[in-house]
Image: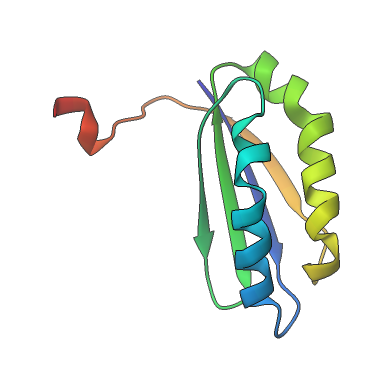
Amino acid sequence: MYARMTRFRLKLGTRDKWFRLRDGMAADIHALKGLKHWFTLQGDDEVVVVAIHDSVWSAEAAMPDVLKLWQRIAHLMDDQPSTKFYDVTRFDTIFDNV
C-alpha cells in the first residue's frame, strides 16, 4: 500500500464550509481509482488528509483527479497544500479481528 498525506491551513472562518464541501465531495473521493481508505485530521485551522492507495501506481494515476478535487476547495485554503508520499509498512484496523 501507498499513502498520500496532504497538509494545508484553512482561512479564518471557513471551517464549517470546509466540512460541508469535504462531505459533499465524498462520492468523488471514493471514486478515485485504487483508493482504499481516506481520513482527515482536523486542527483549529490545519487540515491533514491521508489517502491510502493500493499501490504507488494508483496513487500517481489518481493525481489529476485529486488536483481537480483540491481546486474545488482552494478558495478555503490559507496556503498552498503540501503533499508527501509514503510506503505503508503496516495498516491495521480494529475491524481486522472482528
Q: How many labels sit on residues?
A: 0
Q: Is residue 10 above or below residue 90?
A: below
Q: Which residue is at 28% across, 35% downward? A: 93
Q: Return the x and y of residue 25 as percentages of the image width and height.
A: 67, 49
Q: Which residue is at 71% across, 78% downward? A: 14
Q: Is residue 60 above or below residue 84?
A: above
Which residue is at the front of the view, 1 or 65?
A: 65
Please state if 30 lies on the left or on the right of 92 as rendered. Answer: right
Identity of the residue furthest to the bottom in this view: 13
Q: Return the x and y of residue 43 as percentages of the image width and height.
A: 53, 71
Q: Which residue is at 67% across, 24% downward? A: 59
Q: Is residue 67 above or below residue 73?
A: above
Image quadrant containing the C terminus: top left
Q: Return the x and y of residue 47 as percentages of the image width and height.
A: 61, 62
Q: Quadrant of residue 31?
A: top right
Q: Quadrant of residue 63?
A: top right
Q: Which residue is at 78% across, 59% downward? A: 73
Which residue is at the front of the view, 48 or 66?
A: 66
Please state if 42 lies on the left or on the right of 79 as rendered. Answer: left
Identity of the residue furthest to the left in this view: 98
